[in-house]
Image (spheres, rainbow, N blue to C red):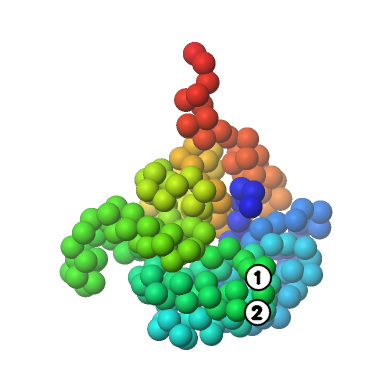
């Protein structure tokens, strides 16, 4: 799948979501629907967004016993979205069950990626509350390798983690990266941010962008500039190959 900017539709209801999408009559977007919107509107919102021709990342972060996740994924497969996800902390067995659930009824399946460590969980909390004594970087690396062993397509991570993940899991293993801010936009609650250009240079395959686009004065212009910045930037390794 080609690289893309994924617009996070962090809206509470259908009305606000569709009012936002109404501004994009021409563009076919790749959007992210998370728990808030999906739990309030249900599968109908997925059908509505799909009927407008947009691609969908359904961000529900499944984490349960393998059998339950497998069954849940076989239900989600019917929604015909383009990307789904699970928590890598659920184990390799759970991730493999998720993949099996997705392909139970059809061979055409969405991309499936794993959340490594949530960016809201820092090393201190990992140690004190989760009793994980490895470093954050080591955990992210091993969780990504586990996702790959389970047959998943990639992980959600910070753009800063993309180089090491590609190093250990290969360049075709997808990195889907939030924490994107434009040079002139507010940081909001994001901590380690990069611009779309920097994310690409670090090797991100998909960037997830919410408020810098949804809260912009001109969301269409913000989206177009973001897309241009991300797609026209070259990866550092490409640049390294250039003479001089
Ligand atoms: O508005 P903003 O660009 O910060 O939105 C980023 C989106 O990516 C939100 O939907 C947020 O929940 C999600 N996300 C994140 N950091 C992660 C995982 C997901 O910001 N580690």
Position of residue 142 in the picture relative to residue 34 (left or right): left
31 shown above or below 179: below
Q: How many marks?
A: 2
Q: Are marks 2 and 1 in contact (CB under 8 Å)?
A: no
Dot 2, how many residues are within 10 Å of its Cα: few (below 14), some (14-19), or many (20+)? few
Residue 20: image location, x then y, percent = 70, 63
Q: Residue at x 51, y 81 (%)?
A: 70
Asked whether 146 or 87 is in front, the reply is: 146
111 shown above or below 193: below
Regarding residue 169, the answer to whether it shows in the image is yes
Asked whether 168 or 49 is in front, the reply is: 168
Mark 1 residue's CB less than 8 Å from ligand 1:
no
Dot 1, how many residues are within 10 Å of its Cα: few (below 14), some (14-19), or many (20+)? few
Circle 2 sits in a helix, a strand or a loop, which is it?
Answer: loop
Q: Residue at x 63, y 52 (%)?
A: 1
Circle 1 sits in a helix, a strand or a loop, which is it?
Answer: loop
Residue 145: image location, x then y, percent = 37, 58
Position of residue 208 in the picture relative to residue 159 (left or right): right
Q: For residue 42, which numbered disc appears in the image?
A: none
Q: Residue at x 60, y 56 (%)?
A: 6
Residue 108: image location, x then y, percent = 67, 68
Q: Residue at x 31, y 64 (%)?
A: 121
145 shown above or below 231: below
The quadrant in which residue 188 appears is bottom left
Label 2 belongs to which residue?
105
178 shown above or below 243: below
Label 1 belongs to which residue?
107
Residue 171: image location, x then y, percent = 48, 45
Q: CA distance from mark 2 to mark 1?
A: 7 Å
């Amino acid at each position: 799948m080609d690289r893309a900017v994924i617009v996070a539709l962090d809206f509470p209801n259908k009305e606000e979501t569709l009012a936002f999408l109404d501004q994009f009559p021409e563009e076919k977007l790749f959007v992210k629907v998370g728990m808030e919107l999906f739990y309030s509107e249900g599968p109908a919102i997925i059908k509505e967004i799909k009927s407008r021709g947009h691609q969908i990342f359904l961000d529900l972060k499944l984490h349960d016993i393998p059998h339950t996740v497998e069954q849940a994924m076989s239900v989600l497969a019917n929604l015909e979205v383009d990307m789904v996800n699970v928590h890598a902390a659920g184990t390799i067995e759970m991730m493999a069950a998720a993949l099996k659930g997705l392909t139970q009824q059809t061979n055409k399946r969405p991309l499936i990626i794993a959340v490594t460590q949530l960016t809201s969980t820092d090393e201190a909390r990992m140690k004190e509350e989760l009793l994980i004594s490895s470093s954050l970087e080591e955990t992210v690396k091993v969780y990504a390798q586990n996702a790959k062993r389970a047959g998943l397509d990639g992980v959600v991570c910070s753009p800063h983690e993309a180089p090491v993940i590609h190093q250990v899991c290969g360049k075709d293993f997808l990195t889907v990266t939030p924490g994107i801010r434009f040079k002139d936009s507010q940081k909001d609650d994001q901590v380690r941010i990069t611009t779309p250009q920097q994310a690409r240079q670090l090797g991100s395959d998909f960037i997830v962008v919410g408020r810098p686009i949804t809260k912009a004065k001109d969301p269409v212009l913000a989206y177009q500039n973001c897309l241009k910045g991300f797609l026209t930037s070259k990866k550092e390794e490409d640049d390294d190959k250039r003479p001089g």
